Image (cartoon, rainbow, N blue to C red):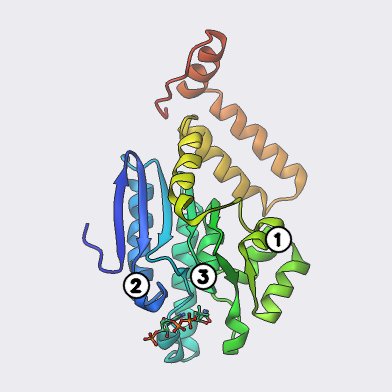
Amino acid sequence: MPYSTLLYELRDGIALITVNRPDKLNALSHAVIGELEQAAGHIVEDAAVRAAIITGAGSKAFVAGADIAELAACDPAAARSLSERGSGVFRRLETSPKPVLAAVNGFALGGGCELAMACHLRIASENARFGQPEVKLGIIPGYGGSVRLPRLVGRGRALEILLTGGMVDAQEALRIGLVNRVVPADRLLAESEQLLRTALENGPLALAGCIRMVDEQEALPLEQALALESRRFGELAGSEDFREGTGAFLAKRKPSFGGR
Ligand code: COA
């Protein structure tokens, strides 16, 4: 498929999606958001894609936020619709039944931090920097930053990041739970791929089930969340993957999952 602002490569079941505007630190223009929407659709719908990595071109930035030149031209109605569009695209990634990992290779600011937070997993290179600097522009985050950040790192830490607009380095991001791992820059893609390959050894329906359950429980009271988990657990017990997984364990062999 032809992309002008993304690079797209399928590596043995893992889609590598690179935001490719390095001269603008991979800022999210309307065009990038449109193509990320296309790519999200591709991840979800293409059976050949089993997982995805999102990263940024160059060694300086993952994504340095929404394109401020475009943002500056927005009136209130346009700003709201820009926010709704971007949020919808990020939500599509977040609800992908296949794991999506952000390989954060530098600045992840504003929409870049928000894009990373919408992914299921985050690995940062040692030079990565995270922040929500929207307040410096006189506005709040528009792609889920004030919603996902407190859920990931807690209200107090989230508010410090949101109110100061300052940057958090990779080690601090690891300490507060904003990223899963920090690795040297030259190991970022290899470690990202390795983590996904480990996940992909498992049953695809079970992976999708974990992603969906972790997402849906957030909106539910504890008792209802536990009841929903029991229901889904029961449903998956009817799958061929469950027969295969348990059968392989008992027969002391490696399972071969078909995703059915
Ligand atoms: N939108 C549009 N263009 C951006 C951008 C953004 N979010 N972030 C960087 N750029 C552009 C710069 O305007 C510059 O373009 P130019 O060479 O045509 O002038 C180019 O990318 C390089 O950025 P520059 O600022 O020169 O790099 P730096 O190393 O001095 O600073 C940052 C790096 C990330 C600290 C700085 O670019 C920055 O603060 N960016 C904005 C971050 C932000 O507020 N994001 C939230 C947006 S809601």
Q: Secondary structure at mark 3?
A: strand
Distance from label 3 to label 2 (Cα)? Answer: 13 Å
How dense is the environment of label 2, judged by Cα within 10 Å: few (below 14), some, or many (20 and up)?
many
How dense is the environment of label 3, judged by Cα within 10 Å: few (below 14), some, or many (20 and up)?
many
Residue labelled with disc 2 = 21
Q: How many marks?
A: 3
Distance from label 2 to label 1 (Cα)? Answer: 29 Å
Instruction: Answer yes or no: disc 2 within 8 Å of ligand 1.
Output: no
With 176 as the anchor, is 129 left or right in this view? left
Instruction: Answer yes or no: disc 3 within 8 Å of ligand 1.
Output: yes
Q: Quadrant of the C terminus?
A: top left
How dense is the environment of label 1, judged by Cα within 10 Å: few (below 14), some, or many (20 and up)?
some
Residue labelled with disc 1 = 153
Amino acid under disc 2: Arg
Name the residue rendered at 58%, 76% in the picture: 141
Residue 250 location (% of width, % of height):
56, 9
Residue 67 location (% of width, % of height):
42, 80
Tell me the number on the disc at residue 256. Answer: none
Q: Please state which of residues 94 and 120 is positioned toward the viewer in this rendering.
A: 120
Say if 62 sits above or below 162 in the image: above
Residue 102 location (% of width, % of height):
49, 56
Residue 140, picture quadrant: bottom right
With 177 as the anchor, is 44 left or right in this view? left
> Which residue occupies the extreme top position in the image?
251
Say if 8 sits above or below 251 in the image: below
Name the residue rendered at 32%, 60% in the picture: 38
Q: Secondary structure at mark 2?
A: loop
Amino acid under disc 3: Phe
Q: Earlier in the sequence, mark 2 or mark 1?
A: 2
Amino acid under disc 1: Val
Residue labelled with disc 3 = 107
